[in-house]
Image (spheres, grey):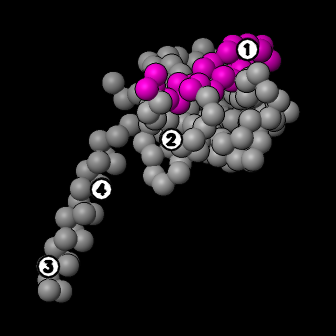
Amino acid sequence: MKERHHKNTLLAAFIALTLFACSEPSEFNRRLEVNPAAWAYADTLDFRFTITDTAARYSLYFDVTHIDTFAWQNLYTRLHTRFPDGKRLSKPVAFDLFNTRGESNGSCSGRRCTVQTVLQENTRFNQPGEYVFTVEQFMRRDSIPGIFAVEFTVQKRTQ
């Protein structure tokens, strides 16, 4: 019995190492918690990261964790980008949390669902230095309940 447990542990470790070895490295990953009772307009989320390799290509992802009974199909946000040279850019970004049948577009566990959205794929950063992505909720109400966290990942492409 002990030997079987040992073999299963080794097999699980091998599978985990294989999966992680094949995945692309994250240049940046940060998860910020939101007050699930009310995400207000003023409660912005800042993601600061530094880019040194301007020749590389990157993929950018946002994960939104929300309650499974979130009152809206979409979460509307405004994404503000501050570039290393100080230039700023703002654009609206909608996260489709549910499909038209009311089913989650992500994976759920218990009462929480997480939806990953690809913001950009295979993109380049033209300037080395610190970038700041600021996310603000941009719904028609100042305070919205049911959002638990937003996670932002910058993944360096290996191909």
Please tell me in which quadrant of the rendered image residue 40 appears: top right
**Distance of label 1 from label 2 (alpha carbons):** 24 Å
Picture layout, residue 95 above or below residue 30? above
Q: Farthest front residue?
A: 101
What residue range appears in magenta? 73-101
Residue in view at x 51 percent, y 19 percent: 120
Q: Position of residue 118 (x, y in %)?
A: 48, 24
Q: Amino acid at mark 2?
A: Thr
Closest to the camera, between mark 2 and mark 3, is 2
- Residue wearing tag 3: 4
Q: Are marks 2 and 3 in contact (CB under 8 Å)?
A: no
| Residue at point 44%, 18% (across, down) | 122
- Distance of mark 1 from mark 4, alpha carbons? 39 Å
Q: Secondary structure at mark 2?
A: strand
Residue 95 forms part of the magenta stretch: yes
Q: Is residue 139 above or below residue 107?
A: above
Residue 152 located within the stretch drawn in magenta: no
**Which residue, given by chain and number where applicable, does mark 2 sit on?**
114
